[in-house]
Every structure is written in structure tokens, then in C-alpha cells.
Amino acid sequence: MTQAQNPAPAVLSQDDLKTLVGQAALKYVVPGEIVGVGTGSTVNKFIDALASMKDQIKGAVSSSVASTERLQALGITVFDCNDVAELSVYIDGADEVDPKGYLIKGGGAALTREKIVAAQSRQFVCIADESKLVKTLGKFPLPVEVIPMAINRVTRQFEAMGGTVVVRLKDGAPLVTDNGQYILDVTGLHIVDPLGFESQVNQWPGVVTVGVFAFQKAQVCLIGAAGGVKTLTF
Ligand code: 5RP
């Protein structure tokens, strides 16, 4: 991992840090191309910044209905993922970032589409504030998108690993993802082997996507910190 640092004002709110990294990500957007766009409050800052160069890009492939709506409201064309062979860059946030660029994602319930767009991109540039940096993945409740009929079975499998599982709710009912599935949030895990863990959970019937991004890890992470934007490369 290598690091570089740019100066910035000393007192910055978390929202300011998100704005900083959202703007810093613009330099990874290739003029004339289509950019992959993630989901979340940090990505919203990136989308807002991207509006300033909307006439220089062809458009975006989006990882959620929410991001699609925000992009379109700003006049940015959104392409269907199936109509685009490869993207040069994918910009997205994360819930946790480890020292190798392995991530936990899915706090915004968009993990499946995020993993698809990340897999379709040559470079994943993660944008986050420094609170997301961890030594080992697992403190943030791990989101797992699951087909509803497999909820209890998958819950038992995580419990056998020592995890505690809750079905994510919205307005008192299970949250339904953009793909029509449920989200399990799993606490109590200590993910020391992200590649092995992702491979294992991917095998469980009913799991659509596990929120460990090890095979689709970040190559670059722009971290908003009190001292400015740090660039981590993995
Ligand atoms: C959505 C995600 C987000 O990227 C992640 O939850 C971080 O969100 P935020 O930028 O709001 O902290 O994975 O599914």
C-alpha cells in the first residue's frame, strides 16, 4: 500500500470529508467514456460533482435506483449495464476498508448491483472518510442479500460461524432490495481471510451476494481525513 496526501483546512465535518473525496474522484473519470457509479451518501457527493463534467462524458452505469434517479435529475445519461462491455472506472463508497483494499459494502442495500458494476470495471476507486478504515473486516454488520425463502437457513449457517443475524427492516417490515430480495445484517464476525470467506458464503444456496468485496476489491481508495484527501493504492 502506498500513500500520498494533499493539504486541506483543519476542521472538517464528516459531510465535508465526503464532499472532498467525491470531488477528488473526478480526476479518475475518463472524458468521452461511461463511468460506473455506486450508491450512498459519499457517492451522492461524487454524483453532484460529476454534474460539472456531464458534457465531457458519455454517461454512467448505475448500481441502484437511487443513484440512477440522482444522475438523471442532473442530466447525466444512465446506460443499462448489459449495453456496456467494460468500464474504465467504478467509483463507490464502502462501510469498511482494510489494509489490502478489501471492503465491506451494502450499508445502502445496493451490494449486488455494486458488485456487478465493480466486476465490469477495470479499476475500482473507493471513496470514504477515515472512519471506514479497519485492520480486519467485520465490525460493521455484514450485509448479505438473500432470497426470502432461504433467510432461516442462511441465518443458521452464520450462527454456526458465531455470527448474530438480523433481517434488515424498513418501516417495520423487511427491507426489499432493488432486486426484490431481503438483507441480513450479520454481526460478531472477524473476517481474517476475505477471499476465502467470500468464496465460502457465495456457495450457500439462497445467498445472492455477500457484502465482502474481496474479488472485487478497490485498487485505489481516496480517504477523507482531517489533513485532507489521502490516496491509498493497493
Ligand atoms: C451501499 C454501499 C455504500 O457504498 C456504503 O454503505 C457506504 O455508504 P456511505 O457513503 O453513505 O457511508 O455499499 O450499498
Image (cartoon, grey):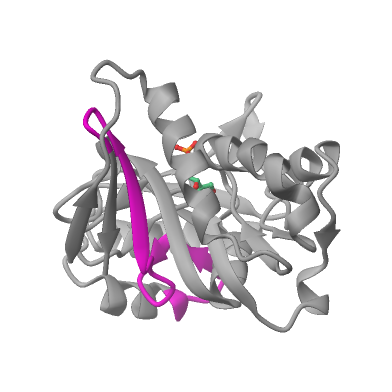
Residue 126 on image: x %, y %: 42, 55
Looking at the image, residue 129 lies above or below residue 211? above
The residue at 76%/44% (across/down) is 71
Residue 193 on the magenta segment: no
Examine the image and state in which quarter residue 121 appears: bottom right
- Residue in the image at 59% along x and 63% along y: 112
**Residue 190: where, in percent of width, then height?**
18, 56
Question: Percent from the top left, x then y, of residue 78?
Answer: 82, 57
- Residue at figure coordinates x 59%, y 47% from the top left: 39
Question: Looking at this view, is 122 or 144 the one in front?
Answer: 122
Taking 47 as reference, is 102 left or right?
Answer: left
Q: Quadrant of the C terminus?
A: bottom left
Quadrant for the N terminus in the image: bottom left
In the rendered image, is residue 218 in sight? yes
Residue 2: x percent and y percent? 18, 64
Q: Nearer the viewer, residue 34 or 32?
A: 32
122 lies left or right of 233: right
Residue 43 as seen in the image, left or right of residue 84: left
Taking the image as drawn, is residue 150 in sight?
no
For this rendering, which residue is in front, 233 or 212?
Answer: 233
Q: Quadrant of residue 203?
A: bottom left
Q: Which stretch is magenta? A: 202-228
Q: Check residue 216 for magenta coloring.
A: yes
Count of all numbered marks drawn on residues in the image: 0
Q: Is residue 74 left or right of residue 197?
A: right
